[in-house]
Image (spheres, helix red, strand yellow):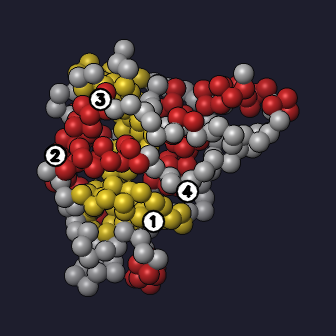
Amino acid sequence: MASTVLGVIGGSGFYQIDGLELVEKVEVTTPFGAPSDAFYRGHLDDTEVIFLSRHGRGHRILPSELNYRANIYGMKQLGVKHLVSVSTAGSMKEDIAPGDFAVVSQFVDHTYQRRPTFFGDGIVAHVSLADPVCAHLSRDLTDAARSAGAKVHENAIYLCIEGPQFSTRAESNLYRSWGVDVISMTAMQEARLAREAELCYSVLALVTDYDCWHQSVGAVDIGEILRVMKLNVALAQQAICNLARLLPNRRRECGCGDALKGSIITERATIPAETAARLRPIIGKYLN
């Protein structure tokens, strides 16, 4: 088994990466219900790669309906330590053009219907989200995307909205006043849960449009989004390939693997046995 395990949450196109070998379908059950789809496991040289289609094959699941906890828990169960989110996003800045990539460093959460934590049911933990992505993984992801030939914007601020509708013009202009760089609907909850699961997490945002604030567009056009996305899939696939080949040469020195240390404030003797069992893959080392 490969010592480096890279998880990727994205679209179905990533299962067909050139050079990905020994691809197998892996069904996973979790205490939080079913993930979005089956996981797919393959190898790129010395790295094991685990893929999950975020919205399910055929794009069946709304952003608000996604079982984020099951998706991240499944990645943890399969041994993932580095997790990359690949998703489309709208640009909120003139210089971040459709077709560009953005690697995210910060989030603004504007959602309101989603369960954002593994904890509760008798156990309380407060992890830090001051820096919500892994700086080391994001650096490597940036290098990997640039090596693939992409134009990459670093340190992007990602606004996560509830959706599934796109913004009104008034909202789009308000969001621009907040200083955000890209807008989308999924990565914030993944970042929260990945931190609790002690995974290194990073986001590769594929910019497809200018939202509706830009004078050059009448409104966000889903057809145009899909067109630009398809053009960028090959670049994104190559970026993931490059990253998979970088990671075995990197020591994990970021601290993400100990994110829960000191964060669980519930007295151990009072944690319900059922809750402890459900969370053992995540908190087991802190219960001994």
Q: Which residue, given by chain and number where applicable, does mark 2 sit on?
A: 148
Q: Which type of secondary structure does the marked residue at label 2 adopt? A: loop
Q: Give the class, few, some or many, for how many residues have Cα within 10 Å of label 3's Cα (few <14, many ≥20).
A: few
Residue under label 4, please give it.
130
Of label 3 and label 2, which has the lower sequence position?
A: 2
Per the image, label 3 sits on a secondary structure element best described as helix
Q: Is residue 140 above or below residue 224?
A: above
Task: Say if 286 sits above or below 207 in the image.
Answer: above
Tag shown at residue 159: 1
Q: Which mark is residue 221?
A: none
Instruction: Tell me which amino acid carries mark 3.
Output: Asn
Q: Earlier in the sequence, mark 4 or mark 2?
A: 4
Which amino acid, by three-letter code, is at mark 2? Ala
In the displayed structure, would residue 107 be above or below residue 187? Answer: below
Given residues 177 and 21, the one toward you in this image is 177
Nearest-to-viewer mark from 3 and 1: 3
In this rendered view, identify the residue nearer to me: 30 or 187.
Answer: 187
